[in-house]
Amino acid sequence: MRAIGLIGGLSWESTVIYYQIINQRVRERLGGSHSADSLIWSVDYTTVENLIFADRWDEVSALLTEAGGKLERLGAEVLLICSNTFSRVSDDVARAANVPVLHIADAVGAEVRARGMRKVGLLGTRFTMEQPFYRERLAAHGFEVVVPGREQRELVHRVIFEELVRGVLREPSRDAYARIVADLADDGAEAVILGCTEIELLIGEKDTAVPVLPSARLHAEAAAAFALAGPALIDQGPAH
């Protein structure tokens, strides 16, 4: 079994999902009391949150690259940045690493392709929804990506940073997100990507009329598959 290195704390609320899903999948595959060989480097979220709002992405890149190096020196054989927003620096981390770095958008893109979908919605932080680093990586998998209108994007963004990363789950926010998913479906989306790892703490398919694709869960499942089966079975995405 390959050792998984998780760059977490982005936020720790969703890093928990990664640890849980990876170990569940390993136990399902190997049986008994098996669990994954894994390491977590969890950063102080306030530090990186302040950096991204100050547009200091070079410092974010340096911090997460350093975290990846620490995990690799401790024995990690694959790395994951446990976040959609912070995958903006994934290519920097990958260039510095000597082991594969599994990109969260490739895990999501592979699932969309497997389901044969041609148009999907995307919810996430304003960075993820509006900047090209994530949407273009998804679109390279061969489907159209649509996002909500400006006011709805602002609501989604605000709830993430004022509530979800702090562990606050509010029913009015769940209802608002469900309405936004419904609007994306009305715009032709066959499913909606929960493109912030904390969103799946708030809503799931029981709350929506169309499928939702939980990015953290899909990313964690890709990591477990890599650890158990090797890189030949992992979709690394299209060339970039």
Image: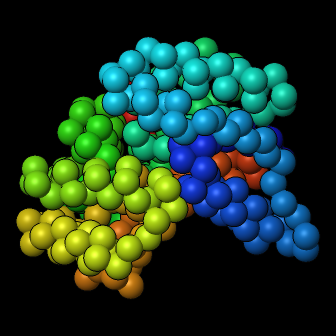
Which quarter shows the C terminus? Answer: top left
> Which colour assignment does the render follow?
rainbow
Q: Could you tell me residue 19's position as x and y percent?
A: 70, 56
Residue found at x 21% / y 57%: 155
Left or right: 57 in relation to 61: left
Q: Is residue 238 above or below residue 23?
A: above
Residue ranking furthest to the right: 33
**Relative to residue 162, is residue 26 depicted above or below?**
below
Question: In the figure, residue 52 lies in which quadrant?
Answer: top left
Q: Evaluate whether residue 103 shows in this view.
A: yes
Give the residue displayed 66% in from the left and 63% down from the top. 21
**Who's the residue at 31% across and 41% down the image?**
128
Of the pair 201 and 195, the residue shown nearer to us: 201
Left/right of residue 114 with respect to residue 41 in the rendered view: left
Compared to 4, does 50 lie above or below? Answer: above
On the picture, is 237 further left or further right than 4?
left
Please name whichever residue, 223 or 46, is drawn nearer the observer in this view of the structure: 46
Question: Residue 31: x percent and y percent?
Answer: 86, 72
